Amino acid sequence: MKREGQIRIDSENLFPIIKKWLYSDKDIFLREIVANGCDAIKKYRSLCTIGEAEDDGSKARIDVILDKDAKTLTVKDNGIGMTEEEVEKYITQVAFSGAQEFIEKYSDKTDAGDGIIGHFGLGFYSAYMISDTVEINTLSYLNDAKAVHWSSDGSKTYEISDCEKTERGTEIIMHFSEDGMEFCDSLKLRTTLKKYCHFMPYEIFFTCIQEKKEDKDNDMEAEEKPVNITEPLWLKAPKDCTTEEYEDFYREVFPDINLPLFWIHLNVDYPFNLKGILYFPKQTDKLQVMPGEIKLFSNQVYIADNIKEVVPEFLMLLKGVIDCPDLPLNVSRSFLQNDAEVAKISRHITKKVADKLVSVFKNERKEYESYWDDISPFIKFGCIKDDKFYERMKDIILYKTIGGEFKTFGELPKIGDKVYYVSSTDVQAQYIKLFKDNGLDAVILEHNIDTHFVTYLEYKEQDLKFVRIDSEIDEVLKSDDAGKTEAPDSEKLITLFKDALGMEKLEIKTQALKNADMPAVITINEYQRRINDMNRIYGNMFGNSNEKAQETLIINTSNPTVAKLEEFDEDKQRLICRHIYDLAALSQRRLSAAELEGFVARSVEVMGLL
């Protein structure tokens, strides 16, 4: 007999809020309905374990069935099922939580609370995000139970009656609304299942009735395969996992043609339950930090990607999965609650990552060095963002020298209180040669993040100064014989170059350098250049980036050509002075099109002097 009733909700406006605004994305409905099926199976298995229910030997499964002609989507489980009383209680009284009551009833008998996903009532109502009518057919595990049918069009009324269902479990039949018709598509549903249900704990099978009929008509018998992996690798003990398994799992989860460099397997039982695998991906861009992807799960149910409250921002350069049942999620699993607990989990993840890096450095130094170019942006970003992480990492940050060696912080090649560095081995090749020819060393810091990192290091280590190799080179490379031998008239030289170049803002100095081969070098003010570099990244946040950093032309009085300048007539002096500047600029940076055109033309003129 069909009976009617009214759904009991405390507020007149609560139901439309549940239907439309409880969840941030419409496709989450499938996660909620399938997760409820897993919840029902978990309850039944737990009751069988403690002898409260009889195990009939059936294999746990959830079926997701699309009927395009009927415009329905059915999610069917063979879990605990519901009696009419339970349907009334858990479906029509939204304020109750079936899972909560189940935990309270059996908490002293079993681990039934493990894996209970959440509030069945509210999760069920997510079906109305894509449906105008939802039906339930359910049969309880109890021997004397009758099958129950429930139906509602989303208003405050419903109908309930007996039905002919003969198999234990529950099926939810969703009749697509006009707004939900996008899900009347097998590809869309498969994609959504893979996104939200890929690692749920019981096998999930997807069927499109029309496609199955076509296969039969074509004499094809497709092998039935679950769409999910019920025992993801993160559930195994690290000691039981092989390299091949870690790499296969990485390919399964992430669309990356490159294999990861190495990984961290998280397996924490205290003070909270947390499992997962974090991969260090190979960086494909030498200059830019490539974003990663951390997928967050709770009891194998996908929650979201890159939740910054749980995963610190710098860890999002990694790829991986974290499953933390202890996350204090709200009822829709869309937002976190209890900031203190979340912060504790976040700190623990950071510590585990730091411990792994230190272990690799200490036990596999050569491997660590081979990874360095790929992992250094992540480590440096982490140091800038988290002072505690810097303190853990400080002694294992590597600095590659122009000689090809890796040095730690304590081994940095210093000249006085300064560490010279290279930001581009191509552009600054001539300066590198000058250093090498004179037995000097510098470190290579070519990544975009290094602009910020050297500033951060100077803040943390205030007795140290980082100077780019083209910034203060005159003092470092000053000749030991400077002042002992006769040199060209400095004032006269400076005047000659100023007149020839006509660059008012260019500062010109003379210096006898150790290397006599180069007639001149250009240095750039370190502070101004760093400001310009950061402005290019952050859009003039630190002032006007169009204002060039101060350049200084250092004329090498040890150079034979400079020494002979006074022997040429005025026109040739101007030509040679300009050509000397071109050579110095070419060694310091890439010339603009106009500068390059002028350089080529003057080179031809210089050749004509031979």
Image (cartoon, helix red, strand yellow):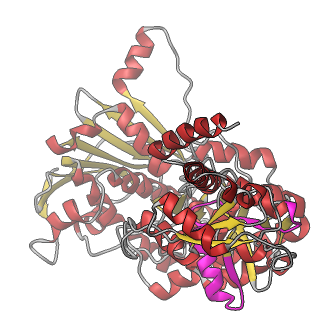
Give the answer, above or below, for where 8 lies relative to 137.
below
Q: Is residue 435 magenta?
A: no
Q: Which quadrant of the structure image shows residue 367? A: bottom right
Q: Is residue 569 above or below residue 66?
A: below
Image: magenta residue range: 437-466
**Horizontal arrangement in the rendering, residue 364 relative to residue 581 (left or right):** right
Left or right for 112, reference 91: right
x then y, percent, for residue 415: 80, 80
* Residue sitting farthest toward the bottom: 463
Q: Nearer the viewer, residue 488 or 443?
A: 488
Expressed as whole percent of the image width and height from the top left, the position of residue 270 reads: 68, 81
Identified at 37% across, 58% down, the residue is 82
| Location of the C terminus (image quadrant) | top right
Q: Relative to 363, is 81 above or below? A: above
Q: Nearer the viewer, residue 607 or 207?
A: 607
**Residue at image point 89% right, 59% down:** 366
Q: Residue at x 76, y 86 (%)?
A: 417
> x, y (%) of residue 144?
41, 56
- Spot occupied by residue 416 in the image (x, y as percentages of width and height): 79, 85
